[in-house]
Image (cartoon, rainbow, N blue to C red):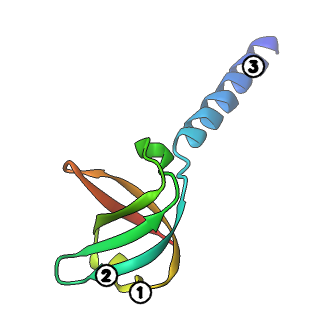
């Protein structure tokens, strides 16, 4: 019985750590400019912890057209940015 409890506890701990590692942290920002033709957006954003980057204004590429359609100048957004093929890219948006 103790062996089963140890295995169950280890399994729960493993899944808990794995799901925590997959958690995505959104960053708040304001859309300053949208360049639909170039698939780029200029964002005034808070600190990007996953990229070790302080708050600033910068240009990001947009991962796909569905995200691009959601961006309007002056809008408050929450987004996830990452390096895609070496370029800073907005990969998620809410």
Element at label 1: loop
Q: Are marks 2 and 1 in contact (CB under 8 Å)?
A: yes
The label nearer to you, 2 versus 3, is 2
Q: Going 30% across and 65% down the picture, which residue do you hit?
A: 59
Element at label 2: strand
Q: In this orientation, does residue 34 appear?
A: yes
Q: Position of residue 43 (x, y in %)?
A: 40, 69
Task: Give how far apart the Cα atoms at labels 2 and 1 are.
Answer: 7 Å
> Residue 6's quadrant in the figure?
top right
Q: Going 42% across and 83% down the picture, which residue do you hit?
A: 70
Task: Give how far apart the Cα atoms at labels 2 and 3 are.
Answer: 56 Å
Pick the front one: 80 or 8 = 80
**Residue under label 2:** 34
Q: Which of disc 3 and disc 2 is earlier in sequence?
A: 3
Q: In this orientation, does residue 62 appear?
A: no
**Residue under label 3:** 4
**Residue under label 1:** 72
Pick the front one: 88 or 11 = 88
């Amino acid at each position: 019985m103790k062996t089963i409890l140890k295995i169950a506890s280890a399994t729960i701990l493993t899944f808990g750590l794995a799901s925590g590692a997959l958690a995505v942290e959104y960053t708040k920002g304001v859309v300053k400019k949208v360049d639909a033709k170039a698939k780029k957006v200029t964002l005034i954003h808070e600190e990007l912890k996953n990229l070790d980057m302080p708050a600033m204004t910068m240009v990001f590429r947009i991962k796909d057209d569905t995200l691009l359609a959601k961006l309007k100048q002056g809008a408050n957004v929450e987004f996830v940015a990452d390096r895609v093929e070496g370029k800073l890219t907005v990969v998620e948006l809410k």
